[in-house]
Image: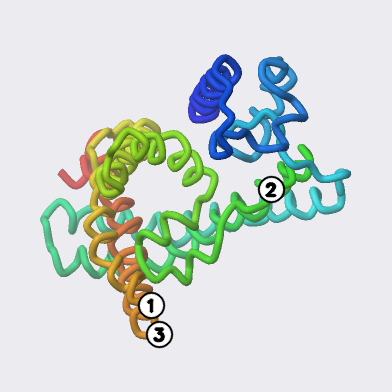
Amino acid sequence: MWLKTASYAFTNRDLRHAYLHPSKRAEDALPDIYAQCPYPKNISLSNLTYFWWAPTLVYQPVYPRSPRIRWSFVAKRLAEVFGLSVFIWVASAQYAAPLLRNSLDKMASLELISILERLMKLSTISLVVWLAGFFALFQSFLNALAEVTRFGDRDFYSDWWNSDSVGTYWRTWNKPVYQFMKRHVFSPLIGRGWSPWAASVAVFSLSAVLHELLVGVPTHNIIGVAAVGMLAQLPLIKLTAPFERAGGHYGKLVGNTVFWVSFVLIGQPLAALLYFFAWEAKYGSHLKGKA
């Protein structure tokens, strides 16, 4: 909701500027679809309410709309959300939670070999749960919401699993957030003379803060792991960018391998271990009982 509010303010600022200072240059022309609800007629409670519910983070006065609501489609997508949510809960309770609890002693004594073993075991269930959550959110829930709101653009993700670089993954797996960052952070900085790399650093720095809040606040532990994990994507992007530019079968294969290794083994399982350990050290009874 905060991102939506920011986009609403930024876009209407630009529309107000175009309204007060009209330009005849073709590159400054507004999209044709905006003529259906020109500024300032779009400043209404109904227009804002629709944007709040629409499955997008980038505001427009008007969006492409589907002709009708297919309620059977909505029911199928919501059934998928429910079924996958139950699966995630069961898988986490039966497989992830015991692994996390069994890792506490090893983490406390810094037994690196045992920690690595727990990390590799956790990577499998972590990946399965993440994929189920991804499908439930981006394929099922967002499509159900788009159908109810008759939102015409259903491009919520691309084939990120075939990414030939880490940069490609971040551009394709979560398109609503990517489009927000590109529209309201990256492109304005480029327009102010920033280099593409400096603008990317700014984007990932903002994302690092938001990820740390997203994980740290619910777990009551602002320990910086999520933030560091996001900032660590920058050297990985630099590392895999040559494979993306090189193209060819082997370049894509190497880039995709680096992406999957960093994604499966280093990313989420390690973050889960560290946040769980921090939670137990601060609030849990497992470590205290051992002490």
Query: Disc 2 marks which residue?
Result: 153
Residue 179 sits above or below residue 105 on the image:
above
Q: CA distance from mark 2 to mark 1?
A: 29 Å
Label 2, secondary structure: give it: loop
Residue in view at x 41 percent, y 68 percent: 124
Q: Position of residue 208 (x, y in %)?
A: 31, 40
Q: Are marks 2 and 1 in contact (CB under 8 Å)?
A: no
The Cα–Cα distance between marks 3 and 1, rounded to whole angstroms, is: 7 Å
For this orientation, the residue located farthest to the front is 24
Amino acid type shown at disc 3: His
Q: Callout 3: helix, strand or loop?
A: helix
Viewer-proximal residue among 214 and 232: 232
What colour scheme was applied to this rendering of the protein? rainbow
- The residue located at (47%, 38%) in the rendering is 183
- 256 lies above or below 229: below
Measured in 3D between alpha carbons, the distance from the residue under mark 3 to the one under mark 2, in whole angstroms, is 32 Å
How crowded is the residue under tag 1: few (<14 C-alpha within 10 Å), some, or many (20+)? few
Residue 285 at x, y percent in the picture: 28, 39
Q: Position of residue 122 (x, y in %)?
A: 35, 64
For residue 247, which numbered disc appears in the image? 1
The amino acid type found where label 1 is placed reads Gly
**Of residues 129 and 41, which is closer to you in this image?**
41
Q: Amino acid at mark 2?
A: Asp
For mark 3, what is the residue?
249
In the rendered view, does 184 fall on the left or right side of 273?
A: right
